[in-house]
Image: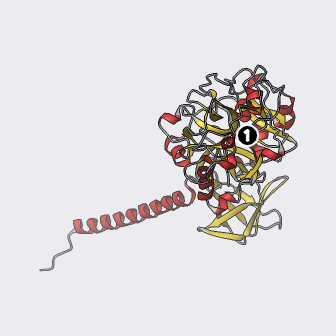
Amino acid sequence: MKLKPFKKEKRSNKYKLTMIILSSLAFIFLFIAIYQSFAAYNIKHSETIVDAKVGSMYDIRILAIFIDGEPQPGMTDFPTDKDFSHVRCYVDGEYREDIIGTWESDGLKITGFTHKTDCNVYFISTPILLRDAILSAHGGITAITAKARPNFDTISTTTGGANGGMFAEPDGMMGGTSYYFRGTHDLNNNVLFAGFQWKVIRIDGAGNIRMIYNGTEAQFNSSGATNGATAGTNATLATGTVAFNPQTNNNSFVNYNNSPNDTTGVRGHVNAFFNSLSATDRGKIVTTAYCNDRTSFCDAFGNTTGCGTGTLPTWYASNLRLAQVNKNPTLACPVAFRISLGAALITADEFVFAGKRLVTENTNSFLRNNQPYWSMSPNTFGSGSASLFRVVGNGALSASDTNVQFLVRPVISLNPNALIPGANGGNGSATNPYRVQ
């Protein structure tokens, strides 16, 4: 007897076929979704741009927009603050040099493709000068110069108005005009450079950006913000602790060049830090003049010049300018006391320009880090000891004998041509510092 095929088996074969087809379709859709997600991150911006330059019939479809390597999901329009001569098209992960993007009066034009092309478009920021970014963020040179000279007999506890922000001052050492910061840690004067955090003190008359060490970039990456006024309690805001000079019983020990060029003196410590930087980073730092003003007087009122040698009682010019009744800091420096260096220390005058005052607490000054550290400005010689100005833990300006050990915060001057990567180079704030290329 011949048995007929069981009908249920036929239904089962059809069922299997259906499942195979559905599974195949699902795999195809899944592959497409994964490919698009991988290629574009998020295909929320997709439009056709006609090659108007040559009148071609071919189109290009934008899968994703990137700015300085970062995907911009959900971006609905092309940026207008970029250098569009630096638009790159990647097709299937390969950079196509023949596909060129330019910005013209009627919009973005992408030329060079010869067939319908899906393209990830990379916009690359135009680098801008750090000093231009800083000055522009504070209203520009005209607005900064228009501000009246602040009252240096008071500390600064603000970031704007008559006693805070950015000010102009004749630069008697470098020539031209210097633009300096005055105020608190909320000022937008933070920079990341060479693996470290820095606070901009001023832009000098030659256009150099003078900055003071403020910790490591690793600390910033960990906390998400630059070190502030109390960071000395939980982070290292200095490169070490050392005496200005291990000796103190002679006027000569306030001379920066007489500080030992080894681990026992501040000069050797600063030089070692500078030499530890990469050759590339040192190439962005200018060797320039730093002031160790040892102009000397034989009394506290400047009536008699001289002294300043051996063990003669001496009052140095910084003391007369900053510790007496009328506080009058200066950026001038006698030629004899200028030292050409790649790195040095801040001056007492720069402390006062920045908003500090002798023996007056200033807990939120941008130059306070909750720990005492050296300047390179002589104070006096008396009772057998030479002394220099320094900052104490509460932010006040003070002075100490040269042989006492305090923290060291090196000061460097970036080249006027130092660049940041355009809009993505930061704004100087604690959470978005300027990033030097």
Q: Could you tell me residue 296's position as x and y percent?
A: 77, 35
The answer to whether 164 is drawn above or below residue 344 in the figure is: above
Q: Nearer the viewer, residue 151 or 136?
A: 151
Q: In this view, does 265 lie above or below 91?
A: above
User: Within 10 angstroms of label 1, few (less than 14), some, or many (20 or more) residues?
Assistant: few
Colour basis = secondary structure
Q: Nearer the viewer, residue 114 or 197?
A: 197
- In this rendering, the answer to whether 120 lies above or below 294 is below
Residue located at (16% from left, 76% from top): 3
Say how many tags the image has.
1
Locate residue 149, reporting x and y percent: 82, 26
Is there any visible trace of residue 72 in the rendered image? no
The residue closer to the viewer here, 369 or 116, is: 369
Q: Residue 351: image x %, image y %?
A: 69, 33
Q: SS of the residue at dot 1?
A: loop
Q: Can residue 430 be seen in this view?
A: yes
Task: Locate residue 24, reporting x and y percent.
Answer: 41, 66
Q: Mark 1 points at which residue?
A: 309
Q: Outermost residue toward the bottom?
A: 1
Query: Residue 330 versus residue 108: which sits nearer the camera?
Result: 330
* Displayed quadrant of residue 394: top right
In the rendered image, the residue lying farthest to the left is: 1
Q: Is residue 116 left or right of residue 2?
A: right
- Where is the C terminus found, in terms of image quarters? bottom right
Outermost front residue: 311
Q: Which amino acid does label 1 sit on?
A: Thr
Tell me the quadrant of the picture where the N terminus can be found: bottom left
